[in-house]
Image (cartoon, rainbow, N blue to C red):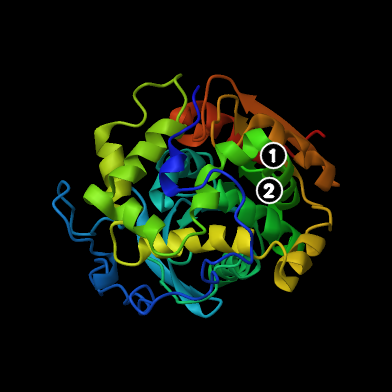
Amino acid sequence: MTVPHSSAFGPTGPVPPGGPAAPADEASPADQAAPAGQASPAGRAAPADQAPGPMGRTGAGGPVRLDGPWAHRDVAANGARFHIAELGDGPLVLLLHGFPQFWWTWRHQMTALADAGFRAVAMDLRGVGGSDRTPRGYDPANLALDVTGVIRSLGEPDAALVGHDLGGYLAWTAAVMRPKLVRRLVVSSMPHPRRWRSSMLSDFAQSRAGSYVWGFQRPWLPERQLLADDAELVGSLIQDWAGPRTPEFPDEETLDVYRRAMSIPSTAHCSIEPYRWMVRSMARPDGVQFNRRMKRPVRVPTLHLHGSLDPAVRTRSSAGSGQYVEAPYRWRLFDGVGHFPHEEDPIGFSTELINWLKDPEPDR
């Protein structure tokens, strides 16, 4: 598979953290959107969830609160409001989406988990979907506290965390920072943060595959590129990163859903901010401190899933993550699948996930 056209974002090589770009935590007044409003008593999305534009039709719930067997609501955690979709009863499984998506990426797993006796909750990360768009707080430590705060707000003692892409990065982080709140860990399409950092800096092939991350370091332009032509680039990225095994994913309707969600005001800026921090902080004290903190081993059973044809995160970048886990660790490679195994092969992914969650003694 060819490398995705992520060079549309700009440079394909490392950008010096001290370069001319503005710091990640300095957003323009136009990008510092006020927190999204609360949901109405009727359960309809607040105005912040409404995206303008001519793309397709949007139901009463707007582009985020999509209809289905799940229920939508908001919860407060870590000083912000987070939109969640939930389905089922039983042990909590908290699902964390990646870029450029939102909670809906877990629609297949939510129904499968509920049918298997779990309480499936998919949350929108800070700045995305129906959650608050704050002007600060997009470093991984704070985003991980968002996740663990949602667990507490749901009234649960712990959760099995399932994260894809950026959500996987945050799941790794939460398992290190708040191990008592993480019962089990499942990561898809994302290496351990220390492994990600070393691969982006020392592996030219991974640096080239992740060229979109380097391109994000420029101010203003990446946001405009994401939103141009009704967020056409969002659809292009998902198509380019998907593998050839399942040609039915993504279809045009699915791409329209993700494009509408990205078109909500300030979402593009907030979606990019975590990646800006990940690069610009590498030589700063906060980034060095975070990297040292992540030396602590993960001590909860971990399932690591990856598509064999993932063009955005190379297999060998993820494969070495087991060295940071001092607990049962299982590596599972999905043959012929790209960056979105949970959507490209939803049955296979859900089966692997549920069998592992139900295994009382997961193997190393």
Q: Would residue 114 appear left or right of 364 to someone viewing this image?
A: left
| Circles 2, 1 touching at the beta carbon (< 8 Å) | yes
Q: Nearer the viewer, residue 135 or 171?
A: 135
Three-letter residue code for mark 1: Leu
Does residue 171 appear to the left or right of 10 in the view shown? right
* Residue shown at 46% from the left, 33% from the top: 4
Q: Residue at x 83, y 53 (%)?
A: 297
Q: Position of residue 90 (x, y in %)?
A: 56, 52
Viewed as shown, does residue 206 lie left or right of 121?
A: right
- Residue 303 image label: 1
Q: Nearer the viewer, residue 21 or 3?
A: 21
Q: Is residue 128 above or below residue 208?
A: below
Name the residue: 39% across, 64% down: 220
Crowding near the residue tagged with mark 2, few <14, some 14–19, many ≥20 C-alpha atoms within 10 Å: many
Residue type at mark 2: give it: Leu
Which residue is identified by label 2? 185
